[in-house]
C-alpha cells in the first residue's frame, strides 16, 4: 500500500462467498480498498499493515461469532467502524451488537442500494473524523515546530530536507546535541506529508527498561511471562502504516540492536511468547546525540544497523553555530509565554544571550526565557533576570559579539530593533558587501535583501540611526 493511498479500507468477513462478493463489489464501486476473509479467525490472523476503516461481518460465523470479532476489533482498532449482518428477525441480536460498539446492523437479505447508502454514510463519518484528527495534529505540530525557527543557512538546509523526505518511506537518521529539536524534526517529517493521517509513535530508547525492551517494542502474548494475563500489541505494531521515531537509538544494547535489524530487514515482528511473526510496514526515523560511526568502530553499535538506519541523515546544528537565529527564537518564546505583553530585552541581557555557549541548545534557551519572565517584572528583561550560568560567562566568541554590540545603545529595545542594529553593524563592517554580510549573519542573500528593505538600511557604510 502506498503512502498516498487514502482510500477507505473495507474488510468483509462472511462465510458465504456470494454475499462476500456482493459486499466487495459494492465497496469497490464506491472506490474503497477492499479485502475479505471467510472467518473471524482468518480476519484476525491476517494482521493488516494498516487497520481497516470499516468491517462488515456476519453475526453467525463458524467458531468465533461476529460479536466475538466485534469485541476483538474494537480492542485492537478502536477507530474501526463495524457493521454486523444479521438474519431476518434477529432484532434482539442486533441490539446486543449495537451495545458492544457496532456502528449499525443490516438484515439479510438486503438490497444493494441499502448497503450502498449505509457505506456512504459511514464513509462520510470516517472522513470527518480523519480530517478533525489531522487538523488537531497539525495545530499541535505547528506549535511544536516553533522550535525549528531560523533563517541561518544550516536551518534552511534542515527545512529543505524535511520537505524532500515528508512523503518517503526512506529511513532517516537525525543527529544533533540534546535540546536541538530532533523530535520536532521527526514530527515535521511525519505530519507535513502524506503520512499525516497515519500513526506516529515516539520511543525513547534510553528510557526503556532493559528486561522489558523486547516486549515493549514487539509486544507479547498471553502467558508469555509472569504477569502477562493478556496479549499486548508492541510499539512497532502500534506504528503500523505510519512512522516510528526511535529517539536516542544509540542507547539500545547490542542484543536488542540485532533484533531491531531483523525487524527492519524482514518487515515483521515476533511478539514475545509467540511462534508466529506479524507483518508490519513502518517508516523508521531514528535520532541520536552520539557519534554512531565512532560507536560501531568501538563495537558498541552494530555497523549493519547503522547503515540500515543511515540512508538519509539530517544533522541539526547546535545553537552556538547559528547565533543569528537567537533573536528570532527569543521573540518566538516571548510570544509563546507572554503573548501580547510586549516584553523587551535590555541590550546587556541580549548580549549575554548572544555570547553564551548554550550547551542545552534551543531547549535551554526557552527555559531561560521562561525563567526570566517568571522572575522579572514582565516589562523588560535585564541581566539580573537571566540564569546564573549566563551571568557566569561561558562565552566562546565574545570578541565577535562585542563587535556587534553598541555600547551607546539605549538600555531597552525591541527585538526587531536589535536585529536591525545587528544587521546594520555587520553591513557597515564589510563595507556594504552583501555576500560577506550574509555569510557573517548566516542568512541567504534573499533574506538579507528582504531585511535591508524592511529596516531601510543604507546600502553602504552608514551611521547607525538613532533608536529613540
Image (tube, grey):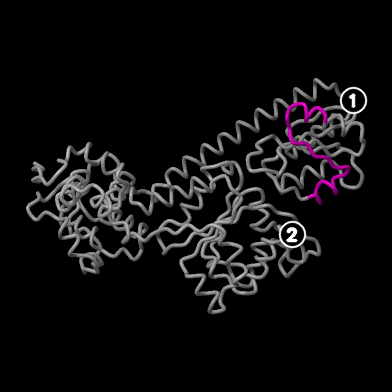
Position of residue 103 relative to residue 398, above or below, is above
- Residue sitting at x 73%, y 70%: 226
Classify residue 320 as left or right of residue 239.
Answer: left
Among the 4 quarters of the image, the one containing residue 112: top right
Determine whether the residue tagged by mark 2 lies in a helix, strand or loop: loop
The reply, left or right, for residue 465 in relation to residue 301 is: left
Observer-nearest residue: 123 or 293?
A: 293
Residue at mark 2 to residue at mark 1: CA–CA distance: 38 Å
Is 30 one of the magenta-colored residues? yes
Q: Give the x, y percent position of residue 412.
A: 14, 48
Residue 104 is covered by the magenta coloring? no
Q: Nearer the viewer, residue 375 or 196?
A: 196
Residue 109's disc is: 1
* Residue at (57% x, 59% y) in the render: 311
Image spot of residue 326 (x, y percent): 28, 53
Which image quadrant for residue 307? bottom right
- Foreground tag (2 vs 1): 1
- Where, quadrant-wise, is the N terminus in this rendering? top right
Q: Position of residue 360 (x, y in %)?
A: 36, 63
Which one is earlier in the sequence, the residue at label 2 or at label 1? Answer: 1
- Span of residues in magenta: 25-46
**Crowd band around label 2 with a 10 angstrom C-alpha radius: few (<14), some (14–19), many (20+):** few
Image quadrant holding the C terminus, namely top left
Q: Label 1: few (<14), some or many (≥20) within 10 Å?
A: few
Q: How many marks?
A: 2
Q: Secondary structure at mark 1?
A: loop
Report if the CB atoms under discs 2 and 1 are less than 8 Å apart.
no
Residue 232 point in image, percent of width and height: 70, 58
Residue designated by label 2 = 230
Taking the spot 50% from the left edge, 50% from the top edge, the residue there is 187
Amino acid at each position: 500500500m502506498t503512502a498516498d493511498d487514502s482510500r477507505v479500507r473495507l474488510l468483509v468477513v462472511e462465510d458465504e462467498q456470494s454475499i462476500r462478493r456482493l459486499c466487495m463489489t459494492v465497496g469497490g464501486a464506491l472506490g474503497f480498498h477492499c479485502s475479505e476473509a471467510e472467518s473471524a479467525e482468518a480476519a484476525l490472523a491476517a494482521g493488516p499493515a494498516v487497520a481497516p476503516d470499516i468491517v462488515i461481518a456476519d453475526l453467525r460465523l463458524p467458531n468465533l461469532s461476529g460479536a466475538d470479532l466485534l469485541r476483538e476489533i474494537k480492542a485492537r482498532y478502536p477507530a474501526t467502524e463495524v457493521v454486523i449482518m444479521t438474519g431476518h428477525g434477529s432484532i434482539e441480536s442486533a441490539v446486543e451488537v449495537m451495545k458492544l460498539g457496532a456502528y449499525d446492523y443490516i438484515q439479510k437479505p438486503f438490497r444493494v442500494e441499502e448497503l450502498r447508502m449505509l457505506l456512504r454514510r459511514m464513509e462520510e463519518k470516517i472522513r470527518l473524523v480523519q480530517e478533525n484528527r489531522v487538523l488537531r495534529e497539525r495545530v499541535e505540530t505547528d506549535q511544536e515546530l516553533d522550535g525549528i525557527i531560523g533563517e541561518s543557512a544550516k536551518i534552511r538546509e534542515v527545512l529543505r530536507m524535511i520537505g524532500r523526505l515528508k512523503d518517503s518511506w526512506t529511513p532517516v537518521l537525525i543527529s544533533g546535541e540534546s535540546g536541538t529539536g530532533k523530535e520536532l524534526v521527526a514530527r515535521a517529517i511525519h505530519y507535513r506529508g502524506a503520512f499525516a493521517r497515519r500513526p506516529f509513535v515516539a520511543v525513547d530508547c534510553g528510557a526503556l527498561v532493559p528486561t522489558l525492551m523486547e516486549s515493549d517494542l514487539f509486544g507479547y502474548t498471553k502467558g508469555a511471562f509472569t504477569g502477562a494475563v493478556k496479549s499486548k500489541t508492541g510499539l512497532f505494531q502500534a506504528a503500523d502504516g505510519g512512522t516510528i521515531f526511535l529517539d536516542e537509538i544509540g542507547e539500545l544494547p547490542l542484543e536488542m540492536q540485532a533484533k531491531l535489524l531483523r525487524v527492519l530487514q524482514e518487515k515483521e515482528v515476533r511478539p514475545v511468547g509467540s511462534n508466529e511473526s506479524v507483518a508490519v510496514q513502518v517508516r523508521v526515523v531514528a535520532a541520536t546525540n552520539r557519534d554512531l560511526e565512532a560507536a560501531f568502530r568501538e563495537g558498541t553499535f552494530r555497523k549493519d544497523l547503522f547503515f540500515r538506519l543511515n540512508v538519509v541523515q539530517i544533522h541539526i546544528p547546535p545553537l552556538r553555530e547559528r547565533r543569528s537565529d537567537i533573536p528570532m527564537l527569543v521573540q518566538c518564546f516571548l510570544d509563546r509565554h507572554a503573548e501580547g505583553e510586549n516584553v523587551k530585552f535590555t541590550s546587556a541581557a541580549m548580549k549575554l544571550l548572544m555570547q553564551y555557549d548554550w550547551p542545552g541548545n534551543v531547549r535551554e534557551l526557552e527555559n531561560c526565557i521562561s525563567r526570566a519572565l517568571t522572575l522579572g517584572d514582565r516589562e523588560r528583561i535585564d541581566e539580573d533576570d537571566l540564569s546564573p550560568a549566563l551571568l557566569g560567562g561561558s562565552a566562546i566568541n565574545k570578541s565577535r559579539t562585542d563587535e556587534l554590540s553598541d555600547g551607546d545603545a539605549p538600555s531597552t529595545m525591541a527585538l526587531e530593533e536589535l536585529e536591525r542594529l545587528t544587521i546594520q553593524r555587520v553591513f557597515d563592517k564589510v563595507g556594504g558587501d552583501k555576500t560577506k554580510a550574509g555569510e557573517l549573519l548566516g542568512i541567504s542573500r534573499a533574506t538579507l535583501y528582504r531585511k535591508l528593505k524592511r529596516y531601510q538600511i543604507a546600502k553602504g557604510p552608514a551611521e547607525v540611526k538613532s533608536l529613540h
